[in-house]
Amino acid sequence: MKAATPALVTLEQLGIDYVAHTFDHDAAITDDIGYGRAAAHALGVEEDRVYKTLLAQSENGPVVAIVPVNTQLSLKALAQVLKAKRCEMVAARDASRITGYVVGGISPFGQKRMLPTVVDESAVLHTTLFVSGGRRGLDIEVGADDLIAVLHAMLGAIATASD
């Protein structure tokens, strides 16, 4: 494996069990179905077990939202969980600057600073789930409980059906 990402370093330092899965990142497929769904297909994993890490902004600052790749983030629901007036998506270039990761490889672990995090409540239906490992072509399989605990995350119904 290439050099460890901040996400892998963080999990190692915390003693969290995980499995790193690498796959060929195919830009053509990604353009059609998105990074997360492409990862699910490349890994042969159900899409509802692969979660994408998104960045939103509330009046209180940036927030991380983690939802299954086969869903969309409900900004209204996210704002309700955060008790904020509203949320909006952060521009891709700003998401990279805030997290320290490239878009398509933003991991919830090892970001530049710990941000408030909300995980879709569906995560607890899975023993393990997959999130980005900090670069395109790398996903981390980690326990749902560990994900929530390490990130000090709130749970909420923040995902809606994809179009």
Image: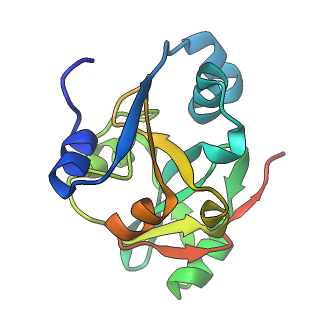
Q: Horizontal and vertical percent for residue 112?
A: 20, 53
Q: Is residue 135 visible?
A: yes
Q: Residue at x 33, y 42 (%)?
A: 96
The N terminus lies in quadrant: top left
Q: Is residue 35 found left or right of 104 in the rendered image? A: right
In depth, the one of 140 and 18 nearer the eye is 18
The C terminus lies in quadrant: top right
Q: Is residue 23 found left or right of 32 in the rendered image? A: left
On screen, residue 140 above or below 21: below
In depth, the one of 134 and 150 nearer the eye is 150
**Count of numbered badges drawn on the protein:** 0
Q: Residue at x 20, y 46 (%)?
A: 12
On screen, residue 67 above or below 18: below
Furthest toward the bottom, the residue is 83
On screen, residue 9 above or below 126: above
In depth, the one of 106 and 9 nearer the eye is 9
Q: Residue at x 27, y 44 (%)?
A: 7
Q: Horizontal and vertical percent for residue 42?
A: 61, 20
Q: Horizontal and vertical percent for residue 146?
A: 40, 62
Q: Residue at x 53, y 88 (%)?
A: 83
In depth, the one of 142 and 79 nearer the eye is 142
Q: Horizontal and vertical percent for residue 4?
A: 20, 30
